[in-house]
Amino acid sequence: MHTVTGLVGFARALRHSGMACGPTRVQAFLAAVEQVGFDRDAIYWAGRLTLCSDPDDLPRYDVAFESWFGAAETSAEPVGHPLPRPSQIAALTAADASGDEGEADRPLAAAASDAEVLRRRDLSELGVPEREHLRRMLAVLRPEPPTRPALRRRRDKRGALSSRATLREMLRSGGEPVRLRRQRRSRRPRRVVLLVDVSGSMSPYADALLRFAHVVVRRSPASTEVFTLGTRMTRVSRQLRQRDPEAALLAASRAVPDFSGGTRLGETLRVFLDRWGQRGIARGSVVVLFSDGWERGDATELADQMRRLRRLARAVIWANPHAGHDGYLPVQSGIVAAMPHVDRMVAGHSLRSLEDVWSWVRRLSHPAVGGAKCQD
């Protein structure tokens, strides 16, 4: 069998099995094989890295690879029967999960509508299939890291005129101003600190909040820190830097000894500020506190520590899951003590509200925004 023909036939077999192997991915696969050689293991990893676009593609890829490159002689025809590709939108209700074939083939518009409904649902009210679908939706989030102006400047066609660079250009051209050089201030990532309450009252939200934190950490690992709050403070940034979300959540759960315990926000914030925040992690950062505000400790202590935190941070955002419910009033002792030192009180009960939290993180990270304390 001609080598290129065999590789293209393998890609055709993958496409027949349900994988999205378009011409661009096939070209990348052929280029990768040309670089790594025609060893069987090298071909396997070259194809896995270039032809697979979804975690569900991996079992299909392994089956097709063993069939195509196994010891037995194979033809250039597609291998086996097409494997059913699971819908990207999982069933969101019991009726959907047990419906007939016609219901399983519902239009994509209806599936997208279900996904939008799920984005607005309260995380504490989700069933098992809905939570599984929510995990997939969280895994594909791409939150853009906030930035801040840096001291250094870089060349830019539309920036301010750089007199030094222009003079140097004139010296090179014999004194003639042949080209005007322009520049503008570059930007650096703004540090974000996520403080996640994992006490008993927040347990229905803890898994989704930590998965959201994992997405943020993976997007900008060098400028994101994550801590859990309960009866003690635990830093889980290192655990959440793992690529696989399940492995990251398992490592974080092992590191946190006080899941579903009590809440002492004032004491834990004091530990955070004394050990990490005062030394630099909180300085100039956007701090997001995910908590319902149920404080078992001294509310005066919480007010004092929130005052310290606000002096250090660029902005402080409080994401309260109960704030997304109709008729909610901030009467909890912790909320009342913290409100004077919070830049923004937002809801944190759904995927949509988490996206709104991140939009506020980006807005309050800019020097021209912030300082106005208000509530949604």
Image (tube, rainbow, N blue to C red):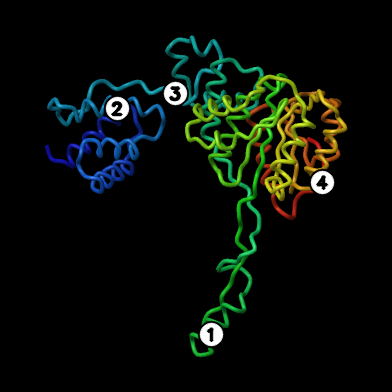
Q: Nearer the viewer, residue 100 or 257?
A: 257
Looking at marks 1 and 3 on the same chain, the residue that comes earlier in the sequence is marked by 3
Q: Image point 59% across, 15% down: which residue? A: 127
Query: What amino acid is found at the position of numbered circle 1 in the picture?
Result: Met
Q: Amino acid at mark 4?
A: Ala
Type of the residue with mark 3:
Ser
Per the model, the C-alpha gap separating discs 3 and 2 is 20 Å
- Residue under the image location 57 percent in, 83 percent down: 167
Q: Can you give x and y, in whole percent of width and height, for residue 276 in the image?
A: 69, 42
**Residue at label 3?**
87
Mark 2 burial class by Cα count in 10 Å: few <14, some 14-19, many 20+: some
Image depth: mark 1 or mark 3 in front: 1
Label 3 or label 2, whichever comes before in sequence order: 2
How far is mark 4 from mark 1, CA to CA?
47 Å
Q: Which mark is residue 372?
A: 4
Q: Which residue is mark 2?
A: 62
Q: Residues within 10 Å of mark 1 (few under 14, many from 20)?
A: some
Q: Quadrant of residue 5?
A: top left
Question: How far apart in space, not on screen, are marks 2 and 1 (Cα)?
Answer: 62 Å
Q: Give SS at disc 1.
A: helix
The disc label shown at residue 170, or none:
1
Instruction: Classify 10 Å Cα crowding around label 3: few (below 14), some (14-19), many (20 and above).
Output: few
Earlier in the chain: of badge 2 and badge 1, it is: 2
Q: Residue 165 lies in what quarter of the image?
A: bottom right
In the displayed structure, 93 sits above or below 212; it is: above
Q: Residue at x 29, y 27 (%)?
A: 62
SS assignment at label 4: loop
Badges 4 and 2: C-beta atoms under 8 Å apart? no
Compare residues 25 and 166 and report the one nearer the observer. 166
Residue 31 lies, in percent from the top left, at 27, 47
Crowding around mark 4 (Cα neighbors within 10 Å: few <14, some 14 to 19, many 20+) is: few
